[in-house]
Image: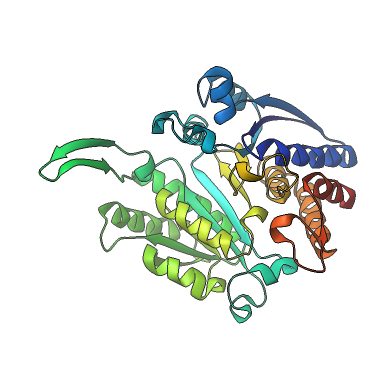
Amino acid sequence: MKYNIAVIHGDGIGPEVVGEALKVLDTIAEKYHHEFVYTPVLAGGCAIDAVGECLPQATIDACKAADAVLLGAVGGWKWDTLPGDKRPERALLGLRKELELFANIRPALLFDALADACPLKPEIVEGGLDIVVVRELTGGIYFGERGTKDTELGLAAYDVEQYAEEEVKRIAVTAFDMAMKRNKKVTSVDKANVLESSRLWRRVVTEVAKDYPEVTLEHLYIDNAAMQLVRNPKQFDVIVTGNIFGDILSDEASMITGSIGMLPSASLAKGNFGMYEPVHGSAPDIAGQEKAKPMATILSTAMMLRYTFGLSEEADAIENAVKTVLAKGYRTPDIYTEGMTLVGTKEAGRLICAEI
């Protein structure tokens, strides 16, 4: 079977981790008799340097023509002085909008081999963690009206949080469908005691829940949810929330697993199309030094195989290979501890390929 993938290597460590992920895909292709065709495109800081804008139209067109998109990372201090609407990170918002990627899926999985890296007490995470944060990605305050105005207290800035019923419904359906394949519990996070947009959110999610009688629904305010995530994370299965709350909670959930560099993510549109990327950033401080961990990007390709291409066996092969490499004691610098075997980016990728 032939699959077309638009590849955005991006900035910082992006090219390094994407390079190893493509080697893993090539290994899968050889073993399972698939063909992956890669179309490299520019986005982020490298696009600004090359063509003067963070998201060229050619990139958008290539992504729309592909079956899926694989992204490394964008941004870095080199471009920090640019105006907000010109910075590399704007490429991500543009891609989400142009590709209609409304659902961000972030698994927060505690790997047994990395349990000691978890910042929480062992008794809190005993037995492991397996949480999925489903974040609405194209609405809310990040895409609302914004601006400045003069007030009695001086210049003021504002950003508007707004959600329509259909936006809430489609992300809720995504969360409930996922919960049906897991432990059948959805936690919806909002701030309905204060925000009108959250009151609409809660009403729509409650309506959607009626179509899923097997799934338990609970509502939490964002402040309580943030606290519960570190107090008792094992109570959660699928968390569904809006854009800004999801941005915060997904990073928090990622961190309690012990290494944000281990975690993949998927941004999905209607149908099977998706963009896949690691949770971590571009980390320009370690770029080109063989210190970057490629596991999150490699695990993102596993999500691509599962969600977009429907290749569950191949996805399992990648995930099991990563677990095996960790179980054998191989560690990149950011998660290295005494007694383990220190490896660089390329060696980590080679070891994972060897286990597939």
Q: Residue furthest bottom?
A: 123
Residue 254, percent from left and from top: 57, 59
Q: Residue at x 48, y 59 (%)?
A: 249
Is 330 or 143 nearer to us in this picture?
330
Q: Is residue 320 above or below residue 24?
A: below
Residue 151, percent from left and from top: 13, 41
Is 104 or 183 nearer to us in this picture?
104
Residue 346 visible, this orientation: yes
Q: Residue at x 58, y 73 (%)?
A: 120
Q: Is residue 112 above or below residue 6?
A: below
Is 154 or 99 nearer to us in this picture?
154
- Is residue 136 toward the left or the right of residue 255 in the image? left
Q: So how many labels did they put on this image?
A: 0
- Is residue 193 toward the left or the right of residue 327 in the image? left
Residue 110, percent from left and from top: 66, 65
Is 6 or 150 nearer to us in this picture?
150
- Quadrant of the frame with the N terminus: top right
Residue 46's quadrant in the figure? top right
